[in-house]
Amino acid sequence: MASPTPETAEVYSIPAAYRKMENTHILFWLLKDIAWCLVWRPLGLLMVLPTLGIAIVIAWRTRAYASELAHNLAIVFWITANSLWMSSEFFGFDTVQITPHITGKHLALVPFLTGLGILLYYYLVTKPREDRAAEVATL
């Protein structure tokens, strides 16, 4: 089957209000990471709430589209992991041994791997099903 041309491809558009929210989200995320880099603990910790909060709202609003939901949930877990890692450094438990090969900052692997698992499930299970359903629908 031939690939869709730009003229026949499905279009996904984002309402302007959602785009504004996404752009604000990027601003908060950058402020959080700059504060982390400069070890400005109050600002870094303060920026976790709006950064994570907006990511959750974006994921909720895109829940009708499996691809968007999967990627936005991965972002929610990425920010969670990133914030946990930042907090581990801010509060000094990043180097604390939890088990022989796991330190405090390694706790961030749980949300990182959760996000990765969501994307793997989408690409290995959900997307192939969507592609097969679309192929059958066009026959």
Image (cartoon, rainbow, N blue to C red):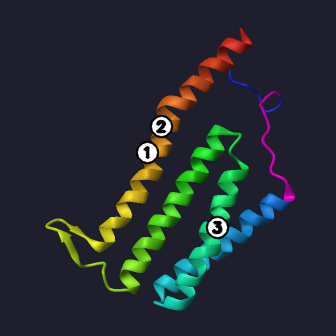
Quadrant housing the C terminus = top right
Relative image position of residue 130 (x, y in whole percent) = 62, 26
Identify the amino acid type marked 3.
Gly
User: Which residue is label 2 attached to?
Assistant: 121
Residue placed farthest to the left in the image? Answer: 100
Identify the amino acid type marked 1.
Gly
Could you tell me which secondary element the residue under label 2 belongs to?
helix
Q: Residue at x 43, y 77 (%)?
A: 86
Instruction: Inspect the magenta stretch and tell me whether residue 14 lies in it.
Output: yes
Position of 92 with respect to 50 (left or right) is left
Could you tell me which secondary element the residue under label 3 belongs to?
helix
Q: Residue at x 80, y 51 (%)?
A: 14
User: Which residue is label 3 attached to?
Assistant: 53
**Distance from label 1 to label 2 (Cα)?**
6 Å
User: Which residue is label 1 attached to?
Assistant: 117
Circles 1 and 3, Cβ within 8 Å, touching? The answer is no
Circles 1 and 2, Cβ within 8 Å, touching? The answer is yes
Q: Quadrant of residue 29?
A: bottom right
Identify the amino acid type marked 2.
Tyr
Q: Residues within 10 Å of mark 1 (few under 14, many from 20)?
A: some
